[in-house]
Image (tube, grey):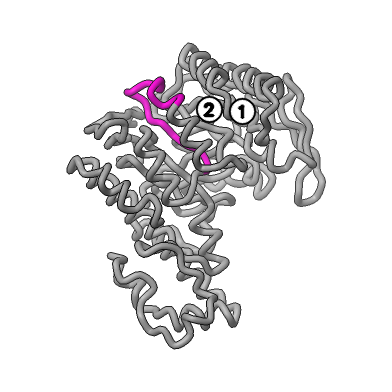
Amino acid sequence: MKKFEFKVLKKSKFARLGIIETHRGKIETPVFMPVGTQATVKACTIDDIKKTGSQIILSNTYHLMIRPGVKRIQDAGGLHKFMNCDLPILTDSGGFQVMSLSKLNKIDKEKGAIFNSHIDGKKFYLSPEESIKIQLGLNSDIVMVMDECPKKTNDYKTIDESMNLSMYWAERSKKAFGHNPHKALFGIVQGGLFKDLRQKSLKGLLKIGFDGYALGGLAVGETQEEMFTVLDDITEHLPDNKPHYLMGVGTPSDILGAVKRGVDMFDCVLPTRSGRTGLAFTWQGKVNIKNNKYQNDNTPLDPDCKNLNLNKYSKNYLNHLFNTNEILGSMLLTLHNINFYQELMKAVRVNIQNDTFDDFHDKYIDKL
């Protein structure tokens, strides 16, 4: 079985063109991972996801732990067989849910997160060891350490304590992961908006040693400028021979700015969530297809879209689908958005290869 490996093929200043090798196939970076929270990318089939050029997807440890449960997925042969997906799968650790569902849980340094299910109130314990056990049970290809993702705050002490807790949990996660050379374990850099805490977190993670390094605790309410400042302060210190992953980000302009600062991997629910609510991402900018101005507009949603199957449907028709609450509207716009994100990533890779990424970045950073 092929060992997990990463190689930088070319750099354009900090922007990196690379390749991740897994036993399930190659992943070209920079890469965007569609989010399949509950073993499904909402409103899309896996075959459609693959047709967009997607090379890896993300699933969620917390949600799969609650429904349908790890044993049921294991009995089906693992997550890939369960959802009929032969792409590599990255699973997050559940750390983000510790923050986003904070009213339903409490944190214990040794026990981890103690949850009451948002479905039925049943109590769950998610320790670093349990998180790794679940992810290995799901048979995911890239496993994330258990971390605490704090809400945005300017309270230095709160962020410092949270970062140190994440470091303790990272050590326990690494030990629980053991020897799995065909899989990868990523550490997660925390530290909020504080430069010294981010660098302290990274230094500690480097000492432990991971297959990749993620930046967590962003996309939690900070401005784009604040996020880019964090990246400016930390990415040049990340190891060059490991993939850099910005978790939960983001808009097309977020991605362009982060690639410029050396990030290789992205995930976000934005393209699917926006697609289900009528917002499309296009090369001309955002389109709210519910707007009345698209009635009787028989032009395609995005004339620059290279997947011509998606241009079979006019703005007029899509407007009708959304204004009559037809499921097909959500399906088509979700697929369009994922396809746009993958076309964007392909264009990013081509422009890094051709040494034209800065021009490409400057052309689209304020447009998308």
**Can you see residue 139?**
no
Residue found at x 65% / y 49%: 68
Question: Considering only vertical position in the picture, is 56 above or below 171?
Answer: below
The answer to which of 124 and 11 lies nearer the viewer is: 11
Q: Which residue is mark 2?
A: 188
Neighbour class for label 2 at 10 Å: few (<14), some, many (≥20)?
many
Question: Considering only vertical position in the picture, is 50 above or below 57?
Answer: below
Name the side, left or right, on which 199 lies relative to 28. right
Q: Secondary structure at mark 1?
A: loop
The answer to which of 117 and 333 lies nearer the viewer is: 333
Q: Secondary structure at mark 2?
A: strand
Q: CA distance from mark 2 to mark 1?
A: 7 Å
Name the side, left or right, on which 10 lies relative to 45. left
Q: Position of residue 322 (x, y in %)?
A: 55, 77
Q: Which residue is mark 1?
A: 147
Name the side, left or right, on which 275 lies relative to 172. left
Mark 2 touches mark 1? (CB < 8 Å): yes
Q: Quadrant of residue 24?
A: top left
Outermost residue, bottom side: 296
For the N terminus, give its image quadrant. top left
Kind of residue sitting beneath label 1: Asp
Of the numbered discs 2 and 1, the one sitting upstream in the chain is 1
Question: Considering only vertical position in the picture, is 173 above or below 141?
Answer: above
Residue range in magenta is 233-248
